[in-house]
Image (spheres, helix red, strand yellow):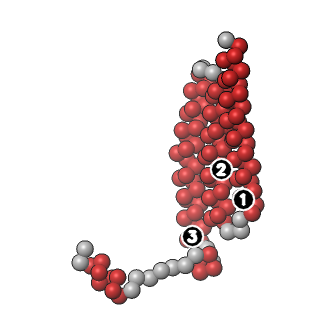
């Protein structure tokens, strides 16, 4: 039985180290990128994957208990709220950007493309 506890400890520690590595990459991405949408993307992806793997590691270390269920519910909550909040921040940045042509381009349909789309 002692071997199973060591295996569980090693697997949980590996998940925690993966989460810490993802957080490190997230921090580098947040400080390296210059545009706010790129920073936001790095932070949102890092939070979702980093927190998820850290919580999975804690669930493995804790074993099957009520605390594991609570950690699982926190993971589900974060997986639903993090993308939604990131999307809202991105929409706010796009609508309030003072120099949109500096960050992204706008494409217009040609007359042929407009006529081709009417028949469909």
Residue 76 picture location, percent across and down = 54, 38
Count of residue discs:
3
Q: Is residue 66 above or below residue 58?
A: above
Q: Is residue 53 above or below residue 61?
A: below
Q: Residue at x 75, y 56 (%)?
A: 28
Residues 43 and 3: in front is 3
Instruction: Determine if residue 58 is in view.
Output: no
Assign a secondary structure to mark 1: helix
Write down the quadrant of residue 73 in the picture. top right
Q: How far apart in space, not on screen, are marks 2 and 3 (Cα)? A: 22 Å
Q: Residues within 10 Å of mark 3 (few under 14, many from 20)?
A: some
Q: Residue furthest bottom?
A: 111
Please tell me the numbered disc located at residue 46. Answer: 2
Q: Residue furthest left?
A: 119
Residue 54 picture location, percent across and down = 67, 37
Q: Residues within 10 Å of mark 1 (few under 14, many from 20)?
A: some
Q: Residue at x 59, y 20 (%)?
A: 64
Assign a secondary structure to mark 3: helix
- Discs 2, 1 touching: Cβ within 8 Å: yes
Q: How far apart in space, not on screen, are marks 1 and 3 (Cα)? A: 18 Å
Residues 88 and 31: in front is 31
Tell me which label, 2 or 1, sits earlier in the chain: 1
Please tell me the numbered disc located at residue 30. Answer: 1
Q: Residue furthest top?
A: 1
Tell me which label, 1 or 3, sits earlier in the chain: 1
Q: Nearer the viewer, mark 1 or mark 3?
A: 1
Q: Nearer the viewer, mark 2 or mark 3?
A: 2
Write down the quadrant of residue 42 in the picture. bottom right
Please tell me the numbered disc located at residue 94. Answer: 3
Residues 23 and 88: in front is 23
Q: Is residue 82 above or below residue 61?
A: below
């Amino acid at each position: 039985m002692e071997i199973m506890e060591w295996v569980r400890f090693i697997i949980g520690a590996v998940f925690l180290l993966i989460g810490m590595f993802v957080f490190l990459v997230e921090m580098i991405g947040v400080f390296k990128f210059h545009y706010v949408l790129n920073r936001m993307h790095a932070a949102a992806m890092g939070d979702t994957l980093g927190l998820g793997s850290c919580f999975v590691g804690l669930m493995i270390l804790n074993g099957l208990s009520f605390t594991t269920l609570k950690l699982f519910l926190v993971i589900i909550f974060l997986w639903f709220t993090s993308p939604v909040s990131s999307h809202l921040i991105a929409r706010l940045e796009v609508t309030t950007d003072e120099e949109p042509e500096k960050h992204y381009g706008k494409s217009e349909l040609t007359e042929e493309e407009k006529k081709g789309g009417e028949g469909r």
